[in-house]
């Protein structure tokens, strides 16, 4: 029983990353070769919990072609007098779109340390898989919201057998 309990966390996380369940975004290695003519509105939501930071998206939304690679820029300002390390957790709404929202590069894949009084820009390189336009649950969707929340890195516990920076 104890072994099953420890194994369930990484297995559930893997399941969510593979299926997009619960709004979990999948990491991609390569972008599609061709973009569709269909346009989606991608909205960005930013939040901070328990940090002396301002965290904003440099754009509130982007209109993108399905399959086209895009860059979204975010800005973090540390109002503390010491460096602060945090990690962003994220999700996609509607949940059905999560399996098609793919990130090539994202600040959310690792801890971020921002120096005292510093402001940093954080990019996200992403695309929406062209299969989005064929899925009966998503093909009529016109917008997707990507939401990030930064937490102090010490508040986020890694899954059993993983390092904090995984």
Image: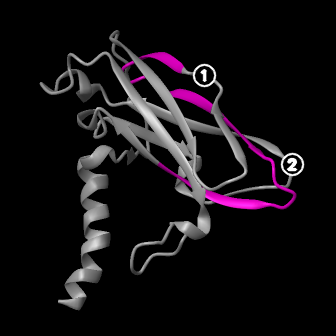
Magenta residues (range): 61-89
The reply to whether residue 25 is visible in this rendering is yes
Q: Residue at x 40, y 39 (%)?
A: 102
Dominant SS in magenta: strand
Residue 48 pos. (x, y %)? 59, 46
- Left or right of 17? Residue 104 is right
Image marks 1 and 2: residues in contact by CB distance under 8 Å: no
Query: In which quadrant of the rendered view does residue 99 lie?
Result: top left
Residue at the farthest top position: 37
Query: In which quadrant of the rendered view does residue 91 lie?
Result: top left
Query: Of residues 31 and 63, which is closer to you in this image?
Result: 63
Which residue is tagged 2? 117
Few, some or many residues within 10 Å of mark 2 (<14, 14–19, 20+):
some
Disc 1 to disc 2, how far (Cα)?
A: 23 Å
Q: Residue at x 46, y 38 (%)?
A: 147
Which residue is tagged 1? 59
Query: Of residues 33 and 150, which is closer to you in this image?
Result: 150
């Amino acid at each position: 029983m104890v072994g099953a309990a420890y194994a369930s966390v990484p297995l559930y996380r893997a399941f969510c990353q593979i299926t997009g369940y619960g709004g979990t975004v999948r990491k991609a290695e390569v972008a599609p070769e061709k973009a569709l003519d269909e346009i989606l509105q991608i909205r960005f939501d930013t939040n901070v919990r328990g940090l002396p930071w301002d965290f904003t998206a440099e754009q509130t939304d982007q209109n993108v072609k399905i399959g086209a690679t895009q860059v979204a820029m975010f800005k973090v300002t540390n109002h503390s007098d010491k460096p602060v390390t945090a990690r962003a957790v994220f999700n996609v709404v509607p949940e059905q779109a999560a399996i098609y929202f793919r990130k090539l590069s994202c600040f959310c894949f690792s801890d971020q340390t921002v120096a005292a009084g510093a402001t940093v820009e954080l990019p996200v390189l992403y695309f929406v898989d062209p299969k989005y336009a064929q899925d009966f649950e998503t093909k009529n969707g016109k917008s997707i919201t990507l939401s990030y929340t930064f937490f102090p890195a010490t508040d986020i516990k890694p899954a059993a057998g993983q390092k904090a920076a995984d």
